[in-house]
Image (spheres, grey):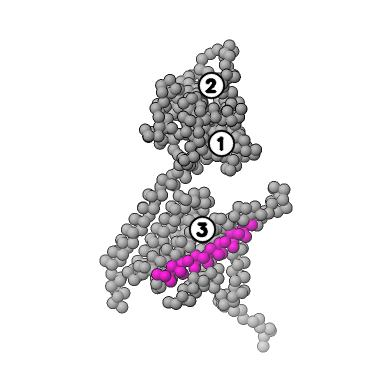
Amino acid sequence: MTGNNYWKILTRPLVDENPLTLQILGICSALAVTTALDTALLMSVVVVCVLALGNGSVSLIRRQLPHSVRIIVQITIIASLVIVVDQILQAYAFEMSKRLSVFVGLVITNCIVLGRAEGFAMHNGFCASVLDGIGNGLGYSLVLVIVGAIREFFGKGSLLNLQILVPVSDGGAFEPLHLMLLPPSAFFIIGGLIWYIRRKRPQQAEKPEFTLRPHEQGTE
Amino acid sequence: MSETANRDGTARALGVTLAVAFVCALLVSVVAVSLRPVQQANVKAERVNQLVREALSGIAPMVKTENLEAHVVELASGQFDDGIDPATFDAEIAASNPDTSVEIPREFDLARLRRRALHAPVYLLRGSDNAIHTIILPVSGRGYQSILRAWLLLDGAASKVRALRIYEQSDTPGVGSRIEDPDWQAQWRDRPIYDDAGVLRIGVRTRGGAETDEYAKYLVDGISGATRTARGVDGMVRFWLGDFGFGPFLQRIREANR
């Protein structure tokens, strides 16, 4: 494969084939960890690591892997990687790991991870698979960071815990939008993002499953 | 086609899954075991932080983390030992290791602990003017039938007690356990520690004579029926404030304030 191809594998999942906005995968964790930018960033790092390592290891053993047990083996590998990352976070980023709580463990069930292992790494070489993992992880991260930044900024008036707008309770003029800190706001923001991307790239929009017949005027 | 058939054989499936499971198990176990000490230190630091905050409730309503400092003090000299991380230092483990602990001479051993660590953690709560607002000392001693553990909170000049918060004891329920009563512990509030000559006077009165005693203002009332628990608290407080406890450290603070 040429360098150009590798570059495509890495960059296509950012916008053109973004797992969150095109395939609508991994929404659950995207709702939960985006109340603040710092948790969104840490979650992004976790998912990028797990995706890259998971894709890499699945790709390495893809020729040895019997077809009948491939999913369970992929899950085992992914689960082990998630546990390792979770343990490292608990040791070296204790405060943050408490805030991410169960959602680090739930990366195991993040459809993006298994989806890329089964859909890409099973059929491609090691380097391409690792790049695909990183690319998809970054695509997921991009959405997480955008949503996290919007939610933290409008919900608390801060970014990365740095107060930018002074809230009314401290004598400022900013009224925090508490809705932004609740899960539904992530739905609205992700929905808005999907609409915007599909407007800019109409080829992403799905064809309507059926079309309404034009109303017939009167009868013959 | 023949390759696919070969790949899907039962023996092969078993072999591959077992190999993957083995490698994964090995990876997870190695990581979990090697990171365990760091994680436990985190959990312990978190617990101490929680306890310190609980001890401070009612004394300093809004404690900001940045105002709370943790240090490890070398007890004999009273100096901070910055070579030891307060987050990972465990006084109980240090006290049971002969290399990091010292036997307490009989005449000093009011708390009946026999040994104590060479070092102890202290926590300083600073006010907005950066002056020390509260000194928080972990203390322990033998009660009637259990080890008492408490936080002793002193004012910034180390001249009087702000509070004594006993958080662990299993002395007789309803009798000795009354040292946990907020009403009883409230007696410690603003109690002076030293007399004018600088002699340690604070303690628990376990005998009568309140009106005639010239040191009455230094003593909190004991608990009737729980004389030995009350003496345990008395010994604990006097040992840790004394020369073999935090005495040298508190001496330095008082000199700095003079």
Direction left: furthest residue: B11
Question: What amino acid is found at the position of numbered circle 1 in the picture?
Answer: Leu
Same subunit, labels 3 and 1: the answer reads no
Check disc 2 and give the amino acid type.
Answer: Leu
SS class of the residue under badge 3? Answer: helix
Q: CA distance from mark 2 to mark 1?
A: 22 Å
Residue A206, visible in the rendered structure: yes
Q: Nearer the viewer, residue A118 or A52?
A: A52
The residue indicated by pointer 3 is: A43
Rendered image quadrant of residue B62 = top right
Give, as a single range, the part of the protein colored magenta: A126-153
Q: Which residue is mark 1?
A: B124
Mark in front: 2 vs 3: 2
Camera-side residue: B184 or A92? Answer: A92
* A123 relative to B178, above or below: below
Q: Which residue is mark 2?
A: B200
Give the prevailing secondary structure in the magenta stretch: helix
Mark 3 surroundings within 10 Å by alpha-carbon count, few (fewer than 14), some (14 through 19), many (20 or more): many
Please name the residue shown 50% across and 24% down the image: B242
In the image, which disc is placed on residue B178?
none
The one nearer the camera, B109 or A46, is B109
Mark 2–mark 3 contact, CB under 8 Å?
no
Amino acid bearing label 3: Met
Q: In the picture provided, is B160 more to the left or to the right than B75? A: right
Determine the chain carrying the residue at label 2: B
The x and y percentages for residue A25 are 51, 66
The chain holding disc 1 is B
